[in-house]
Protein backbone atom coordinates (compact mmCIF):
# COMPACT_ATOMS: atom_id res chain seq x y z
CA UNK A 1 0.00 0.00 0.00
CA UNK A 2 1.40 3.40 -0.99
CA UNK A 3 1.68 6.16 1.59
CA UNK A 4 1.19 9.91 1.43
CA UNK A 5 1.51 12.38 4.28
CA UNK A 6 -1.61 14.44 5.05
CA UNK A 7 -3.19 16.05 8.06
CA UNK A 8 -6.61 15.59 9.61
CA UNK A 9 -9.18 12.86 10.10
CA UNK A 10 -12.11 11.70 8.02
CA UNK A 11 -14.87 14.17 7.22
CA UNK A 12 -13.50 17.17 9.15
CA UNK A 13 -10.73 18.55 6.98
CA UNK A 14 -10.62 21.40 4.54
CA UNK A 15 -9.14 20.74 1.11
CA UNK A 16 -6.04 22.70 2.10
CA UNK A 17 -5.60 20.63 5.26
CA UNK A 18 -5.66 17.46 3.18
CA UNK A 19 -3.03 18.68 0.67
CA UNK A 20 -4.91 17.18 -2.26
CA UNK A 21 -2.09 17.99 -4.64
CA UNK A 22 0.27 15.69 -2.74
CA UNK A 23 -2.34 12.94 -2.60
CA UNK A 24 -3.35 13.19 -6.26
CA UNK A 25 0.28 13.27 -7.41
CA UNK A 26 0.92 9.96 -5.65
CA UNK A 27 -1.17 8.28 -8.36
CA UNK A 28 0.32 7.26 -11.70
CA UNK A 29 -0.87 10.16 -13.84
CA UNK A 30 1.11 12.25 -16.28
CA UNK A 31 1.41 15.99 -16.03
CA UNK A 32 1.45 18.66 -13.34
CA UNK A 33 -1.24 18.96 -10.68
CA UNK A 34 -3.33 22.13 -11.07
CA UNK A 35 -6.29 21.95 -8.69
CA UNK A 36 -8.88 19.76 -6.97
CA UNK A 37 -12.45 20.76 -6.22
CA UNK A 38 -15.32 18.87 -4.53
CA UNK A 39 -17.70 17.09 -6.87
CA UNK A 40 -20.67 14.74 -6.65
CA UNK A 41 -23.60 14.52 -4.25
CA UNK A 42 -22.89 11.29 -2.38
CA UNK A 43 -23.65 10.93 1.32
CA UNK A 44 -20.68 8.75 2.29
CA UNK A 45 -17.30 9.32 0.58
CA UNK A 46 -15.50 12.59 -0.20
CA UNK A 47 -15.04 13.12 -3.95
CA UNK A 48 -12.87 15.63 -5.79
CA UNK A 49 -12.22 16.47 -9.41
CA UNK A 50 -8.42 16.56 -9.69
CA UNK A 51 -7.04 18.41 -12.71
CA UNK A 52 -3.58 17.85 -14.17
CA UNK A 53 -1.97 19.71 -17.04
CA UNK A 54 -0.51 17.36 -19.64
CA UNK A 55 0.89 18.54 -22.97
CA UNK A 56 -0.69 21.95 -22.38
CA UNK A 57 -4.15 20.43 -21.90
CA UNK A 58 -6.15 19.93 -18.70
CA UNK A 59 -6.89 16.28 -17.86
CA UNK A 60 -9.43 15.42 -15.16
CA UNK A 61 -9.49 12.52 -12.70
CA UNK A 62 -11.88 11.54 -9.94
CA UNK A 63 -10.11 11.40 -6.58
CA UNK A 64 -12.03 9.84 -3.68
CA UNK A 65 -11.42 9.40 0.00
CA UNK A 66 -13.10 6.20 1.16
CA UNK A 67 -15.13 6.55 4.34
CA UNK A 68 -13.34 3.92 6.42
CA UNK A 69 -15.69 4.54 9.33
CA UNK A 70 -18.45 2.94 7.24
CA UNK A 71 -16.36 0.70 4.97
CA UNK A 72 -14.20 -0.78 7.69
CA UNK A 73 -12.17 -3.06 5.44
CA UNK A 74 -11.02 -0.77 2.59
CA UNK A 75 -8.57 -3.37 1.29
CA UNK A 76 -11.38 -5.89 0.74
CA UNK A 77 -13.54 -3.19 -0.80
CA UNK A 78 -10.83 -2.26 -3.27
CA UNK A 79 -10.16 -5.91 -4.08
CA UNK A 80 -13.83 -6.22 -5.03
CA UNK A 81 -13.66 -3.12 -7.20
CA UNK A 82 -10.47 -4.30 -8.92
CA UNK A 83 -12.00 -7.67 -9.76
CA UNK A 84 -15.31 -6.23 -10.90
CA UNK A 85 -13.92 -3.44 -13.07
CA UNK A 86 -11.39 -5.79 -14.67
CA UNK A 87 -14.11 -8.31 -15.49
CA UNK A 88 -16.47 -5.63 -16.80
CA UNK A 89 -13.70 -4.22 -19.00
CA UNK A 90 -13.24 -7.60 -20.71
CA UNK A 91 -17.01 -7.87 -21.22
CA UNK A 92 -17.37 -4.30 -22.53
CA UNK A 93 -14.68 -4.41 -25.24
CA UNK A 94 -16.11 -2.95 -28.42
CA UNK A 95 -19.29 -1.66 -26.78
CA UNK A 96 -19.03 1.67 -28.58
CA UNK A 97 -18.53 3.80 -25.47
CA UNK A 98 -14.94 4.75 -26.25
CA UNK A 99 -13.71 3.20 -23.01
CA UNK A 100 -16.27 5.08 -20.92
CA UNK A 101 -18.45 2.06 -20.20
CA UNK A 102 -16.51 0.91 -17.12
CA UNK A 103 -14.81 2.77 -14.30
CA UNK A 104 -11.02 2.61 -14.73
CA UNK A 105 -8.85 2.61 -11.62
CA UNK A 106 -5.62 4.61 -11.73
CA UNK A 107 -2.89 2.84 -9.72
CA UNK A 108 -0.50 4.62 -7.43
CA UNK A 109 3.06 5.21 -8.58
CA UNK A 110 3.96 2.12 -6.57
CA UNK A 111 1.43 0.05 -8.51
CA UNK A 112 -1.19 -0.25 -5.78
CA UNK A 113 -4.93 0.13 -6.34
CA UNK A 114 -5.30 2.56 -3.46
CA UNK A 115 -3.36 4.97 -1.31
CA UNK A 116 -3.15 5.11 2.46
CA UNK A 117 -2.04 8.22 4.32
CA UNK A 118 -0.39 8.47 7.73
CA UNK A 119 -3.68 9.39 9.42
CA UNK A 120 -5.47 6.24 8.33
CA UNK A 121 -7.31 7.72 5.34
CA UNK A 122 -7.75 5.64 2.19
CA UNK A 123 -7.76 7.12 -1.30
CA UNK A 124 -8.41 5.93 -4.85
CA UNK A 125 -8.44 7.55 -8.26
CA UNK A 126 -10.50 6.87 -11.38
CA UNK A 127 -10.22 8.10 -14.93
CA UNK A 128 -12.80 10.90 -15.26
CA UNK A 129 -15.68 10.03 -17.57
CA UNK A 130 -16.14 12.95 -19.93
CA UNK A 131 -19.22 13.99 -21.92
CA UNK A 132 -21.59 12.23 -19.55
CA UNK A 133 -23.25 13.20 -16.29
CA UNK A 134 -25.45 11.99 -13.48
CA UNK A 135 -28.86 13.35 -12.51
CA UNK A 136 -30.16 13.50 -8.96
CA UNK A 137 -33.77 13.55 -10.21
CA UNK A 138 -35.13 11.71 -13.24
CA UNK A 139 -36.39 13.99 -16.01
CA UNK A 140 -38.17 11.56 -18.36
CA UNK A 141 -39.26 7.93 -18.80
CA UNK A 142 -36.47 7.49 -21.34
CA UNK A 143 -33.89 8.41 -18.70
CA UNK A 144 -35.45 5.84 -16.39
CA UNK A 145 -35.30 3.21 -19.14
CA UNK A 146 -31.64 3.97 -19.88
CA UNK A 147 -30.60 3.81 -16.23
CA UNK A 148 -32.42 0.52 -15.64
CA UNK A 149 -30.99 -0.99 -18.81
CA UNK A 150 -27.47 0.00 -17.67
CA UNK A 151 -27.93 -1.45 -14.19
CA UNK A 152 -29.41 -4.60 -15.68
CA UNK A 153 -26.48 -4.91 -18.08
CA UNK A 154 -24.13 -4.48 -15.12
CA UNK A 155 -25.79 -7.45 -13.39
CA UNK A 156 -25.79 -9.49 -16.59
CA UNK A 157 -22.06 -9.04 -17.24
CA UNK A 158 -21.22 -10.03 -13.67
CA UNK A 159 -23.12 -13.32 -13.87
CA UNK A 160 -19.89 -14.76 -15.32
CA UNK A 161 -17.54 -13.30 -12.68
CA UNK A 162 -15.21 -16.16 -11.71
CA UNK A 163 -14.81 -17.43 -8.14
CA UNK A 164 -14.04 -16.70 -5.38
CA UNK A 165 -17.09 -15.00 -3.94
CA UNK A 166 -16.76 -11.23 -3.50
CA UNK A 167 -16.23 -9.79 -0.04
CA UNK A 168 -19.21 -8.41 1.87
CA UNK A 169 -18.12 -4.79 2.13
CA UNK A 170 -20.98 -4.02 4.52
CA UNK A 171 -22.26 -7.27 6.10
CA UNK A 172 -26.06 -7.54 6.20
CA UNK A 173 -26.38 -4.43 4.06
CA UNK A 174 -29.86 -5.41 2.83
CA UNK A 175 -30.80 -7.51 5.86
CA UNK A 176 -34.02 -5.60 6.48
CA UNK A 177 -34.99 -7.47 9.67
CA UNK A 178 -31.67 -6.39 11.23
CA UNK A 179 -32.23 -2.84 10.00
CA UNK A 180 -35.64 -2.94 11.69
CA UNK A 181 -34.11 -4.22 14.92
CA UNK A 182 -31.61 -1.33 14.82
CA UNK A 183 -34.54 1.07 14.49
CA UNK A 184 -36.27 -0.42 17.51
CA UNK A 185 -33.07 -0.16 19.55
CA UNK A 186 -32.54 3.45 18.49
CA UNK A 187 -36.10 4.29 19.47
CA UNK A 188 -35.69 2.60 22.85
CA UNK A 189 -32.40 4.40 23.54
CA UNK A 190 -33.62 7.78 22.24
CA UNK A 191 -30.14 9.23 22.75
CA UNK A 192 -30.98 12.44 20.86
CA UNK A 193 -34.41 12.88 22.51
CA UNK A 194 -36.13 12.76 19.11
CA UNK A 195 -38.65 9.94 19.50
CA UNK A 196 -41.40 12.40 20.33
CA UNK A 197 -40.70 14.25 17.07
CA UNK A 198 -40.77 11.08 14.97
CA UNK A 199 -43.69 9.25 16.57
CA UNK A 200 -45.85 9.07 13.37
CA UNK A 201 -42.90 7.68 11.38
CA UNK A 202 -42.12 5.10 14.07
CA UNK A 203 -45.75 3.96 14.07
CA UNK A 204 -45.72 3.72 10.25
CA UNK A 205 -42.69 1.44 10.44
CA UNK A 206 -44.08 -0.76 13.19
CA UNK A 207 -47.24 -1.37 11.18
CA UNK A 208 -45.15 -2.85 8.35
CA UNK A 209 -42.79 -5.07 10.32
CA UNK A 210 -43.94 -8.19 8.38
CA UNK A 211 -42.60 -6.69 5.14
CA UNK A 212 -38.99 -6.89 6.31
CA UNK A 213 -38.35 -10.59 5.59
CA UNK A 214 -40.22 -10.95 2.29
CA UNK A 215 -37.09 -11.27 0.10
CA UNK A 216 -34.91 -13.14 2.56
CA UNK A 217 -37.61 -15.80 2.89
CA UNK A 218 -38.15 -16.16 -0.88
CA UNK A 219 -35.24 -18.56 -1.57
CA UNK A 220 -33.87 -16.44 -4.43
CA UNK A 221 -30.47 -17.17 -6.02
CA UNK A 222 -27.45 -15.16 -4.93
CA UNK A 223 -26.08 -12.80 -7.59
CA UNK A 224 -23.35 -10.19 -7.85
CA UNK A 225 -25.30 -6.99 -7.32
CA UNK A 226 -24.58 -3.28 -7.10
CA UNK A 227 -26.70 -2.79 -3.95
CA UNK A 228 -26.92 0.99 -4.31
CA UNK A 229 -28.74 1.53 -7.60
CA UNK A 230 -29.74 5.13 -7.06
CA UNK A 231 -30.67 6.87 -10.28
CA UNK A 232 -27.63 9.11 -9.89
CA UNK A 233 -25.28 6.12 -9.92
CA UNK A 234 -25.60 5.81 -13.69
CA UNK A 235 -23.89 8.30 -15.99
CA UNK A 236 -25.95 9.25 -19.04
CA UNK A 237 -24.31 10.33 -22.29
CA UNK A 238 -24.59 14.08 -22.92
CA UNK A 239 -25.31 13.60 -26.63
CA UNK A 240 -27.42 10.45 -26.84
CA UNK A 241 -28.90 10.19 -23.35
CA UNK A 242 -27.92 6.52 -23.20
CA UNK A 243 -26.66 4.92 -20.00
CA UNK A 244 -22.87 4.96 -20.30
CA UNK A 245 -21.40 3.77 -17.02
CA UNK A 246 -22.53 2.45 -13.65
CA UNK A 247 -20.58 4.17 -10.86
CA UNK A 248 -20.15 4.06 -7.06
CA UNK A 249 -19.05 0.44 -6.72
CA UNK A 250 -18.34 0.38 -2.98
CA UNK A 251 -21.32 -1.87 -2.24
CA UNK A 252 -20.87 -4.29 -5.14
CA UNK A 253 -21.02 -7.68 -3.43
CA UNK A 254 -23.17 -10.81 -3.25
CA UNK A 255 -26.88 -10.02 -3.08
CA UNK A 256 -30.31 -10.58 -4.58
CA UNK A 257 -31.20 -9.21 -8.01
CA UNK A 258 -34.52 -7.71 -6.85
CA UNK A 259 -32.62 -5.59 -4.33
CA UNK A 260 -31.11 -3.64 -7.20
CA UNK A 261 -34.40 -3.25 -9.03
CA UNK A 262 -36.07 -2.20 -5.80
CA UNK A 263 -33.62 0.63 -5.26
CA UNK A 264 -34.22 1.79 -8.84
CA UNK A 265 -37.92 2.01 -8.04
CA UNK A 266 -37.13 3.91 -4.86
CA UNK A 267 -34.89 6.52 -6.46
CA UNK A 268 -36.45 6.92 -9.90
CA UNK A 269 -40.22 6.58 -9.83
CA UNK A 270 -40.77 9.80 -7.88
CA UNK A 271 -39.51 13.04 -9.42
CA UNK A 272 -39.27 14.57 -5.95
CA UNK A 273 -35.87 14.91 -4.30
CA UNK A 274 -34.90 12.38 -1.65
CA UNK A 275 -35.18 15.07 1.03
CA UNK A 276 -38.26 16.87 -0.38
CA UNK A 277 -40.18 18.60 2.41
CA UNK A 278 -43.40 19.04 0.42
CA UNK A 279 -44.70 15.46 0.59
CA UNK A 280 -47.49 16.17 -1.90
CA UNK A 281 -44.77 15.97 -4.57
CA UNK A 282 -43.80 12.40 -3.59
CA UNK A 283 -45.75 10.02 -5.83
CA UNK A 284 -44.82 6.72 -7.48
CA UNK A 285 -45.27 7.72 -11.13
CA UNK A 286 -46.44 4.65 -13.04
CA UNK A 287 -44.92 5.65 -16.42
CA UNK A 288 -41.51 5.84 -14.75
CA UNK A 289 -42.01 2.42 -13.17
CA UNK A 290 -42.96 0.96 -16.55
CA UNK A 291 -39.87 2.48 -18.16
CA UNK A 292 -37.67 1.05 -15.40
CA UNK A 293 -39.19 -2.38 -15.74
CA UNK A 294 -38.83 -2.47 -19.53
CA UNK A 295 -35.23 -1.26 -19.39
CA UNK A 296 -34.23 -3.68 -16.66
CA UNK A 297 -35.85 -6.71 -18.28
CA UNK A 298 -34.28 -5.78 -21.63
CA UNK A 299 -30.91 -6.60 -20.05
CA UNK A 300 -31.80 -9.23 -17.47
CA UNK A 301 -34.74 -11.11 -18.96
CA UNK A 302 -32.44 -13.82 -20.24
CA UNK A 303 -31.03 -14.88 -16.87
CA UNK A 304 -33.53 -13.88 -14.16
CA UNK A 305 -35.63 -16.74 -12.81
CA UNK A 306 -39.42 -16.62 -12.71
CA UNK A 307 -39.28 -16.24 -8.94
CA UNK A 308 -36.93 -13.26 -9.17
CA UNK A 309 -39.26 -11.53 -11.61
CA UNK A 310 -42.23 -12.22 -9.34
CA UNK A 311 -40.50 -10.33 -6.53
CA UNK A 312 -39.57 -7.18 -8.44
CA UNK A 313 -42.59 -5.13 -7.33
CA UNK A 314 -42.40 -6.05 -3.66
CA UNK A 315 -38.68 -5.30 -3.80
CA UNK A 316 -39.50 -1.72 -4.74
CA UNK A 317 -41.70 -1.39 -1.69
CA UNK A 318 -39.25 -3.21 0.59
CA UNK A 319 -36.12 -1.26 -0.35
CA UNK A 320 -37.96 2.05 -0.11
CA UNK A 321 -39.16 1.00 3.34
CA UNK A 322 -35.68 -0.19 4.32
CA UNK A 323 -34.01 3.09 3.37
CA UNK A 324 -36.75 4.95 5.20
CA UNK A 325 -36.07 3.06 8.41
CA UNK A 326 -32.32 3.61 7.96
CA UNK A 327 -32.86 7.38 7.71
CA UNK A 328 -35.19 7.20 10.71
CA UNK A 329 -32.68 5.16 12.72
CA UNK A 330 -29.92 7.64 11.99
CA UNK A 331 -32.17 10.54 12.94
CA UNK A 332 -33.02 8.92 16.28
CA UNK A 333 -29.32 8.13 16.88
CA UNK A 334 -28.28 11.74 16.37
CA UNK A 335 -27.21 11.73 12.68
CA UNK A 336 -24.09 9.59 12.97
CA UNK A 337 -24.13 7.87 9.53
CA UNK A 338 -25.44 10.09 6.73
CA UNK A 339 -24.21 13.58 6.03
CA UNK A 340 -26.88 16.12 7.01
CA UNK A 341 -27.32 19.80 6.20
CA UNK A 342 -30.10 20.74 8.60
CA UNK A 343 -31.41 19.54 11.94
CA UNK A 344 -34.27 17.38 10.64
CA UNK A 345 -32.61 16.36 7.38
CA UNK A 346 -32.73 12.61 8.07
CA UNK A 347 -36.33 12.86 9.26
CA UNK A 348 -37.27 14.63 6.02
CA UNK A 349 -35.54 11.85 4.07
CA UNK A 350 -37.44 9.24 6.07
CA UNK A 351 -40.76 10.95 5.38
CA UNK A 352 -40.23 10.96 1.62
CA UNK A 353 -39.45 7.24 1.67
CA UNK A 354 -42.50 6.37 3.72
CA UNK A 355 -44.74 8.52 1.53
CA UNK A 356 -43.38 6.67 -1.50
CA UNK A 357 -44.07 3.32 0.21
CA UNK A 358 -47.69 4.37 0.63
CA UNK A 359 -47.93 5.40 -3.03
CA UNK A 360 -46.49 2.05 -4.14
CA UNK A 361 -49.02 0.23 -1.97
CA UNK A 362 -51.83 2.11 -3.69
CA UNK A 363 -50.61 1.02 -7.16
CA UNK A 364 -49.18 -2.41 -6.35
CA UNK A 365 -51.83 -4.46 -8.18
CA UNK A 366 -51.30 -2.56 -11.44
CA UNK A 367 -47.52 -2.89 -11.07
CA UNK A 368 -47.83 -6.66 -10.62
CA UNK A 369 -50.04 -6.95 -13.70
CA UNK A 370 -47.42 -5.15 -15.77
CA UNK A 371 -44.65 -7.48 -14.58
CA UNK A 372 -46.74 -10.52 -15.52
CA UNK A 373 -47.48 -9.06 -18.97
CA UNK A 374 -43.77 -8.51 -19.69
CA UNK A 375 -42.35 -11.55 -17.91
Image (cartoon, grey):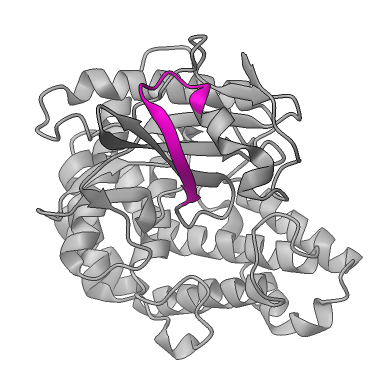
Q: Is residue 72 above or below residue 241?
A: above
Observer able to see residue 296: no
Residue at 44% from the left image edge and 90% from the top image edge? 280
The number of numbered badges drawn on the structure is: 0
Queried whether the magenta region covers residue 262, the answer comes back as no
Q: Is residue 39 above or below residue 49?
A: below
The quarter of the image holding the N terminus is top right
Q: Locate residue 237 relative to residue 33 in the image: left or right.
A: left
The x, y position of residue 307, in whole percent, is 34, 44
Q: Nearer the viewer, residue 12 or 145?
A: 12
| Residue span colored magenta | 25-38
Residue at 75% from the left image edge and 55% from the top image edge? 181
Q: Nearer the viewer, residue 265 or 14?
A: 14
Residue at 66% from the left image edge and 27% from the top image edge? 73
Q: Nearer the viewer, residue 183 or 74?
A: 74
Observer able to see residue 294: yes
Q: Locate residue 243 relative to residue 217 in the image: left or right.
A: left
The x, y position of residue 255, in whole percent, is 48, 36
Q: Nearer the viewer, residue 363 or 140?
A: 140
The x, y position of residue 47, in whole percent, is 51, 45
Queried whether the magenta region covers residue 36, the answer comes back as yes
Residue at 45% from the left image edge and 52% from the top image edge? 39
- As drawn, the residue found furthest toward the top would be 110
The x, y position of residue 24, in whole percent, is 51, 30
Q: Locate residue 2 relative to residue 57 in the image: left or right.
A: right
Amino acid sequence: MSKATTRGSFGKDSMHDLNLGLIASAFDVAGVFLAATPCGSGHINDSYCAVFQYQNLPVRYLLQRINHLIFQNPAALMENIQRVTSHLATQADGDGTGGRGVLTLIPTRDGDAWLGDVNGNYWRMYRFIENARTYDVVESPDQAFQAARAFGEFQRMLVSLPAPRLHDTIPDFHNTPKRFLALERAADADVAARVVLARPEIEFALARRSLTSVLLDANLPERVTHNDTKFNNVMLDDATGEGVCVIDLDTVMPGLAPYDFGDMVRTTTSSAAEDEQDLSKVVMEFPLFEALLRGYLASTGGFLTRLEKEHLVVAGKLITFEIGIRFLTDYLAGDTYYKVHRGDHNLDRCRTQFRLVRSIEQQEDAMERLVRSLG
